[in-house]
Image (cartoon, coloured by chain):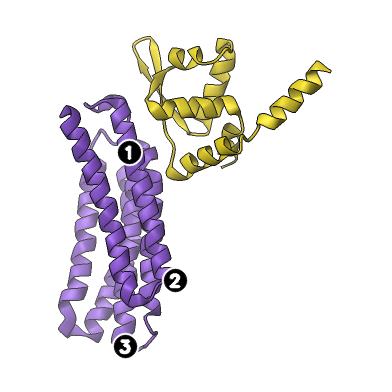
Amino acid sequence: MNKVFKALADPTRRRVLELLRQRPMTAGELSDQFGFAKPTMSAHFAVLKEADLVEAHKDGKQVIYQLKLSVLEDALLGFASLFRAGETLDASEKREAVT
Amino acid sequence: MTPSMRLHAQIAPVALIVAALAAADGYVRPERALVWLTGLATMAVIWLVATLVDRSPSQTDAQRAYLRLSVRAAGLMLAAALGVALVRAVGVEDGGLSKRAVSIATGIALAALGNALPKVAGPLAARRCSPAQMQSLQRFAGWSFTLAGLGYALVWMVGPVQRAETMSTMLCAVAVALVVGRCAGAWKADGAL
């Protein structure tokens, strides 16, 4: 369960899961939604896979990600998004980095 | 241990409990043979169906784990029902407490199975319908059965026994109707399911 909480604590990973709620997407489609470099996105996908929240399938050269959330994990994702878990921390970390 | 052996190893103890309770029920009240024989036959059918499903090569490890969980939950519910019947047969009056306990456990089992449902569904690429639609159906079914199970348990926890029976059955019926309705709607929309 620790891995699930770690995965859901990050706003980017939550956004990935929210996008996947609409439909399964390729790694490229998901990456296009964020302004991060590919390795950064790959690291996020790895954390989500490690927590068993997404599943990846190869379709030719593309990797398709699909949601693999239990109802409880889905509800946790909803709560984490509602309370914006991890976002305040990120903001304060950024402020510290600037100063 | 092969997946098939793992399945049998996990079902066997539950089946043994069901058989022991059925035998005890049969000994105490042989005139109610229909009850304990039905329990015994149901367990046998569940075991047989689970074995056949488990042999399918398309089953993933997660689906096999879900199957084992479902069979054990079903076996324990059967055992609980037979246990309650036995308690009553030997003349113990518990004021409906045993029925309440079994029903609460049934609700929790339904919620647990509903919770795991969207996670164990097979690769969407393997289905013939739209992956987005299939995913949406899986999530809808999972939420419906989880909420119905929690409601079922809650009704039996706090409601009067006479009303709890009707209300809990209605909750399950509504959940099943919603899921079937949603599936039918999806099938009508693109005829893919």
Q: Position of residue A86 (x, y in %)?
A: 65, 32
Chain the render paints yellow:
A
**Residue B2 x/y as whole percent:** 34, 42
Say which residue label 3 marks: B90
Q: CA distance from mark 2 to mark 1?
A: 30 Å
Q: Is residue A82 left or right of residue A62?
A: right
> What SS does tag 1 mark?
helix
Task: Tell me the SS state at disc 3.
Answer: loop
Quadrant (top left/top right/bottom left/bottom right) for the C terminus of chain B: top left
Residue B87 badge: none
Lower sequence index among marks 3 and 2: 3
Q: Which residue is mark 2?
A: B158
Where residue B192 appears, x then y in whole percent? Answer: 18, 28
Q: Residue B46 appears in which quarter of the rendering?
A: bottom left
Real-space CA distance between mark 3 and mark 1, rounded to the nearest whole angstrom: 44 Å
Chain whose colour in the figure is purple: B
Nearer-N-terminus badge (3/1): 3
Query: In what element is the residue under mark 2?
Result: helix
Tell me residue B58's x, y (percent). Answer: 26, 33
Look at mark 1 in the image and give the residue it sits on: B138
